[in-house]
Image (cartoon, rainbow, N blue to C red):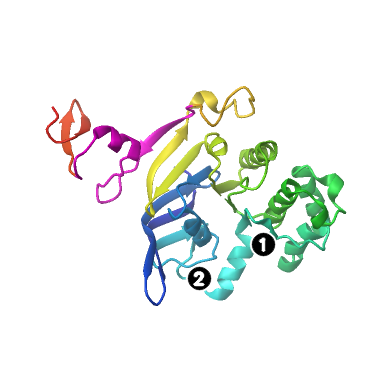
Amino acid sequence: MGEIMVRADGLVKIYKTKETEVLALQGLDLIVEEGELTALIGNSGSGKSTFLNMIGGLDRPSAGSLVVADRNLFTLSERELVAYKRDTVGFIWQNNARNLLPWMTALENIILPMRLSGGKQKRERALELLERVGLSAKKHSLLNTLSGGEQQRIAIAIALANSPRLLLADEPTGSVDSKTADYIFHIFTELNKEGQTILIVTHDVALSKKVRRVAAIRDGKISSERILREKYTDRLKESTIDWRTEDTQEEYAILDKAGRVQIPKEMLSGLQLPDNKVKLDMRDGKIVISAPGQD
């Protein structure tokens, strides 16, 4: 195992109101190594965006442990948290209005976070990032004159401005067309080849099926992981593959520290269980799950 960028251990998040409590994360465990490109998937309300916000320093865990880039997010002071969000992580939102200033040019938007952090050679770095996202010709354009896809690419450049160790992206292709989505994923893969650690939350099926490692969150826990099959690693740019339907990844269930495993719903429905009981057997070194009464 390489250097660990993110280590979540028994992570819990409880949102409280006067009348109710919502358990968003229920003992989530995950390790992301430095240099990985990992996607988080799950239904709405599964806890994936909550988890990403915690890694980004935008929310505090209720219990458990969360260490990112050797920083314990439980113990950071408010001042340390500001520095962490400025220097350690870069965040890309689906709603890019959260980190774009429409009355400024593309170049000025990228320079701004470097100016706030006291970075040097700000203009040169900003021009380099504009070239990386394919928008050098738009450097003097006001943000409100750019298309949604172009604005999202500027948002990626802004997130990279202070050379973060970890790049976080919350639904980065959720508001763009498929061609732009492919281009954004190309940017991510090129960054990752250079060693950038990237964690993406996505509902985009085609994008998730191109990622080497995908962690699925269900009911506030990691329920399974999918690993890209070797034969697809060099075929990510092929347009002849239907990435939405192609079986590109091997899926693995996750065994938690208590020995519990979440069985995919489609497998459970195939068992046609009359209630919540299952029979476990060990056969030829394999654990076999069956409905009661079946041999």
Residue 65's spot in the image, x, y percent?
40, 62
Image: magenta residue range? 247-276
Identify residue for label 2: 76
Question: Residue 193's image quarter?
Answer: top right
Task: Find residue 58 and name its label.
Answer: none
- In this orientation, which residue lies closer to the viewer: 94 or 211? 94
Q: Is residue 163 magenta?
A: no
Q: Dot 1: what SS?
A: helix
- In this orientation, which residue lies closer to the viewer: 25 or 79? 25
- Let me know if residue 106 appears in the view: no
Identify residue for label 1: 98
Q: Amino acid at mark 1?
A: Arg
In the picture, measured across the screen, residue 282 lies left or right of residue 87, that is left
Query: Where the N terminus falls, by quadrant?
Result: top left
Residue 5's spot in the image, x, y percent?
51, 52
| Residue shown at the point (86%, 53%) measured from the top left | 141
Q: Residues within 10 Å of mark 2 (few under 14, many from 20)?
A: some
Residue 96's spot in the image, x, y percent?
68, 56
Q: Dot 2: what SS?
A: loop
Q: CA distance from mark 1 to mark 2?
A: 24 Å
Q: Earlier in the sequence, mark 1 or mark 2?
A: 2
- In this orientation, which residue lies closer to the viewer: 95 or 251? 95
Most frequent secondary structure within the magenta stretch: loop
How many numbered discs sit on the rendered protein? Answer: 2
Q: Residues within 10 Å of mark 1 (few under 14, many from 20)?
A: few
| Residue shown at the point (55%, 28%) measured from the top left | 233
Q: Amino acid at mark 2?
A: Leu
Query: Where the C terminus falls, by quadrant?
Result: top left
- Let me know if residue 83 appears in the view: yes
Rendered view: 237 above or below 102: above
Rendered view: 14 above or below 8: below
